[in-house]
Image: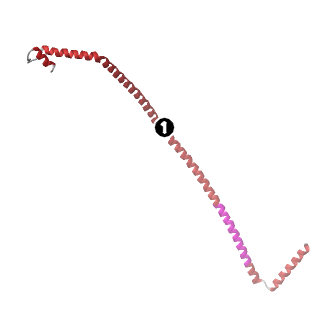
């Protein structure tokens, strides 16, 4: 049975409309209920509110700290980016300088190598020229001897031979006398 039904039965009859007694009873019940709630829940609710407030404040402080860290990190990255472009330009300039130096070194080595090749070729040519000259002199001497031999055979008579042998013998005898 509800409190309204109980109040109607105790009042002695049926009730067909709102009654101040019943509505007052509800109002008093409600006020008492709120009072009891406030009395018993005031401390836990205030502690809950204080705890919640502390948590919210801590969260706000943490958010501020994280934001400051993020801004600091962002500033560091922006500084790195600014320095990165300068570093990239420095690296490119250094690479160009090294490449130019390497180019000059390679060219100098190429000039030296070409000079060594030229000297080597000149030495080989001079050696080959000397060898060919010696070979030509030898062949010329052999040809001269062949021609002289042929001429001597063709032009020399028996009398010339005897005169040559006599002349040779005289020369040998003179040499023996000087020894």
Q: The N terminus appears in which quarter of the rendering? A: top left
Dominant SS type (magenta):
helix
- 118 over 55 or under it: above or below: below
Q: Closer to the camera, 153 or 32?
A: 32
Q: Is residue 55 magenta?
A: no
Q: Position of residue 44 (x, y in %)?
A: 31, 19
Q: Position of residue 174 (x, y in %)?
A: 89, 75
Q: Closer to the camera, 168 or 67?
A: 67
Crowd tier of the residue under label 1, counting other residues whose Cα lies within 10 Å: few below 14, some 14–19, many 20 or above = few
Which colouring convention does the figure follow?
secondary structure
The range drawn in magenta is 121-146
Say which residue appears at 61% left-offset and 55% top-offset: 113
Residue carrying label 1: 86
Location of residue 171 (image quadrant): bottom right
Number of marks present in the image shown: 1
Q: Position of residue 34 (x, y in %)?
A: 23, 17
Say which residue appears at 48% left-offset and 37% top-offset: 86
Say which residue appears at 47% left-offset and 37% top-offset: 84
- 64 over 118 or under it: above or below: above
Say which residue appears at 62% left-offset and 58% top-offset: 117
Q: Is residue 140 magenta?
A: yes
Q: Residue furthest right?
A: 177
Side of 19 where 136 appears, left or right: right
* Residue at disc 1, secondary structure: helix
Q: The C terminus appears in which quarter of the rendering? A: bottom right
Location of residue 164 (image quadrant): bottom right
Q: Position of residue 165 (x, y in %)?
A: 84, 81
């Amino acid at each position: 049975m509800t409190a309204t039904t109980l109040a109607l039965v105790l009042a002695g009859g049926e009730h067909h409309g709102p009654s101040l007694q019943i509505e007052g009873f509800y109002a008093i019940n409600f006020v008492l209920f709120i009072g009891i709630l406030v009395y018993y829940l005031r401390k836990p609710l205030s502690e809950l509110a204080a705890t919640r407030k502390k948590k919210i404040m801590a969260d706000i402080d943490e958010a501020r700290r994280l934001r400051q860290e993020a801004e600091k990190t962002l500033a560091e990255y922006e500084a790195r980016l600014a320095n990165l472009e300068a570093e990239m330009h420095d690296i490119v300039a250094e690479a160009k300088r090294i490449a130019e130096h390497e180019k000059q070194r390679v060219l100098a080595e190429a000039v030296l190598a070409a000079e060594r090749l030229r000297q080597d070729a000149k030495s080989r040519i001079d050696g080959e020229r000397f060898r060919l000259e010696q070979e030509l002199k030898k062949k010329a001497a052999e040809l001269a001897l062949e021609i002289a031999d042929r001429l001597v055979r063709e032009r020399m008579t028996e009398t010339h031979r005897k005169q040559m042998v006599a002349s040779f013998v005289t020369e040998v005898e003179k040499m023996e006398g000087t020894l």
